[in-house]
Image (cartoon, rainbow, N blue to C red):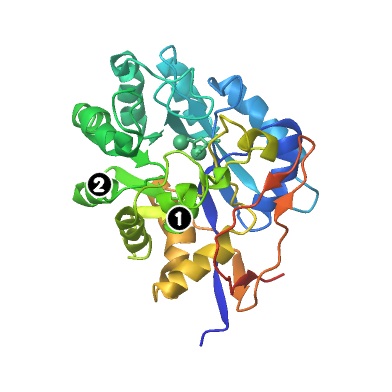
Amino acid sequence: MTQTLTIRRPDDWHLHLRDGAMLQAVLPQTAAHFARAIIMPNLVPPVVTGSDATAYRERIMAALPEGMDFTPLMTLYLTEDTDPEDVAAAHASGLVTAVKLYPSGATTNSASGVKDFSRVARVFEKMAEIGLTLCTHGEVTDANVDIFDREAVFIDRVLDPIRRDHPDLRVVMEHITTADAVDYVKASEKNLAATITTHHLVINRNHILAGGIRPHYYCLPVAKRETHRLALRAAATSGDPRFFLGTDSAPHTDANKLLPCGCAGCFTATNTLSILAEVFEQEGALDRLEGFTSLYGPAYYGLPVNEETITLTRTPPSYPDHIDTGDGPVTVFDPQMPLHWSVAG
Ligand SMILES: NC(=O)N[C@@H](CC(=O)O)C(=O)O
Ligand SMILES: [Zn+2]
Ligand SMILES: [Zn+2]
């Protein structure tokens, strides 16, 4: 039985670091294992302009503990008022790695997102021209569409039309949760990839609803039925470079999760690599873990892979069940299965 596994240092292609006391507390959890991460811009107010991203980047670097090495890859939050020239300048200066599309109302802090997609066509044109990636929260917000169908309907009604209108636009479907999304990515010839979270490889909708309601498993897009989880596991462990890791680690305090109307998000930064090693081992695909965590993301984004490595050892990991933040405790995602792999050192 394999006892150690050394892989190139991973990157996280979808991460929420928040701001202030929360940023201070969660950043070291990610920086302990990851070299880089795509930083989500859904702050209040959102990170919309190049100057917003510059300021946020500085706050992140100021929160990074001495001796830790971590590179935040910044994103801009797309609004109907986004200026294509501001986006182009932020890209040209090397400040931003992607632009993020939130359909208005789809998820946490998405009120400033897009309602009328025709109003952002000029931004898409510019992005296609300069080769800047669009990351999507892929759910429609139409109240008439069942929440479990919102990702599949987004592909048909929103994403596919955008990709037909802008065939050179590079897109990442983020945190995919359905077999429909897996199939859509596989059927595309170019300019499309998807991130998959740690938690969607582990939970299905029963975890949220069976035997009592469990807010810590509630995230968006909401976990779907088991067939979809299995499709995600197959895609993640297949070695297809169009699927790579974006944890979507999304910290909310327990006070904000455990409410009559609680926040969406699972906090997985602390134990993601132990969980992923378990999942890949269960699938007989430990040799493909490195591709998913460390190789395919940089390849899609046109960035170099990390030269440093990390070593996983077959030792049950120990980590706290929550982390303390200045805003209150944040519960670490519980995968409800024994874990056997730890990150060494
Ligand atoms: N995934 C989530 O459930 N929540 C994210 C937002 C998002 O990524 O959609 C958050 O910011 O809390
Ligand atoms: Zn999202
Ligand atoms: Zn997210």
Give, as a three-letter code, the residue at label 1.
Ile
For discs 2 and 1, the disc positioned in front in the rendered view:
1
Q: Is residue 256 above or below residue 247?
A: above
> Dot 2, how many residues are within 10 Å of its Cα: few (below 14), some (14-19), or many (20+)?
some
Q: Quadrant of residue 274?
A: bottom right
Mark 1 is surrounded, within 10 Å at the Cα level, by few (under 14), some (14 to 19) or many (20 or more) other residues, namely some
- Front position in the image: 256 or 165: 256
Tell me the CA gap for discs 2 and 1: 18 Å
x, y percent for residue 10: 54, 58
Q: Nearer the viewer, residue 87 or 141?
A: 141
Is residue 77 among what the camera can see?
Answer: yes
Q: Percent from the top left, x then y, of residue 294?
A: 49, 60
Q: Quadrant of residue 102?
A: top left
Q: Which residue is the site of mark 1?
A: 203
Q: Secondary structure at mark 2?
A: helix
Residue at horizontal 19%, vertical 49%? Answer: 187
Nearer-N-terminus badge (2/1): 2
Quadrant in which residue 313 is drawn: bottom right
Residue 316 x %, y %: 65, 74
The label shown at residue 180 is: 2
Tag 1's secondary structure?
loop
Q: Nearer the viewer, residue 17 or 75?
A: 17
Image height of 301 relative to 98, above or below: below
Q: Residue at x 66, y 69 (%)?
A: 317
